[in-house]
Image: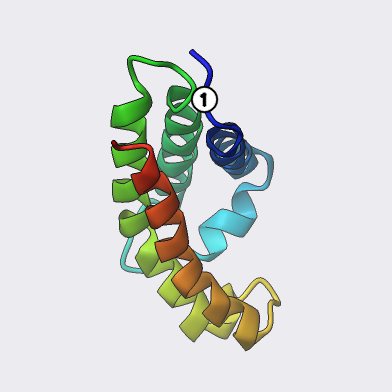
């Protein structure tokens, strides 16, 4: 099946982001809020889910499930974005403005994923 170019791009973003959880785990663990215990588990889990859903977007029988999964994932990791915005230690040395811009970006990504649920 041939998908629109933007679906390949969206899948690639999630595949690369998922792989990055394993390449640079310290960065991701830093933005996990302290009320989530076992940061290694959450980093590995979210990285695997991003990878699998990214790949799943490119497979006809799983693309719908993967699109909905990405929506749920983006909602689930939103607390990390809030934590990153509000906590200087989790800021990854990004400016407050860039960290703030990441918040609505999550909803843009959710809207983008929603395109593939139809």
Classify residue 4 as left or right of residue 48. right
Q: Label 1: few (<14), some or many (≥20) within 10 Å?
A: few
Q: Residue at x 44, y 17 (%)?
A: 59
Q: Residue at x 51, y 80 (%)?
A: 85
Instruction: Note whether 91 is above or below 51 in the view shown.
Output: below
Q: Nearer the viewer, residue 82 or 12?
A: 12
Q: Position of residue 97 (x, y in %)?
A: 62, 86
Residue 77 appears in view: yes
Q: Nearer the viewer, residue 95 or 13?
A: 13
Q: Position of residue 42 (x, y in %)?
A: 40, 47
Instruction: Note whether 75 is above or below 65 in the view shown.
Output: below
Q: Position of residue 3 (x, y in %)?
A: 51, 25
Q: Nearer the viewer, residue 45 or 15?
A: 15
Instruction: Note whether 84 is above or below 55 in the view shown.
Output: below
Residue 32 appears in view: no
Q: Residue at x 32, y 58 (%)?
A: 75
State the image quarter where residue 116 is shown.
top left
Render colour scheme? rainbow
Q: Residue at x 29, y 36 (%)?
A: 118
Classify residue 58 as left or right of residue 93. left
Instruction: Note whether 3 is above or below 102 in the view shown.
Output: above
Mark 1, secondary structure of its residue? loop
Residue behind mark 1: 3
State the image quarter where residue 8 is shown.
top right
């Amino acid at each position: 099946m041939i998908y629109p170019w933007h679906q390949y791009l969206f899948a690639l973003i999630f595949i690369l982001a998922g792989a990055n959880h394993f390449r640079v785990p310290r960065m991701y663990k830093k933005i996990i809020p302290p009320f989530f215990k076992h940061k290694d588990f959450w980093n590995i889990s979210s990285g695997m889910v991003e990878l699998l859903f990214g790949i799943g977007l490119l497979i006809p029988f799983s693309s719908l499930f993967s699109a909905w999964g990405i929506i749920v994932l983006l909602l689930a990791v939103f607390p990390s974005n809030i934590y990153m915005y509000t906590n200087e230690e989790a800021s990854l040395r990004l400016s407050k403005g860039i960290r703030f811009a990441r918040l609505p970006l999550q909803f843009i990504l959710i809207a983008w994923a929603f395109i593939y649920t139809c």
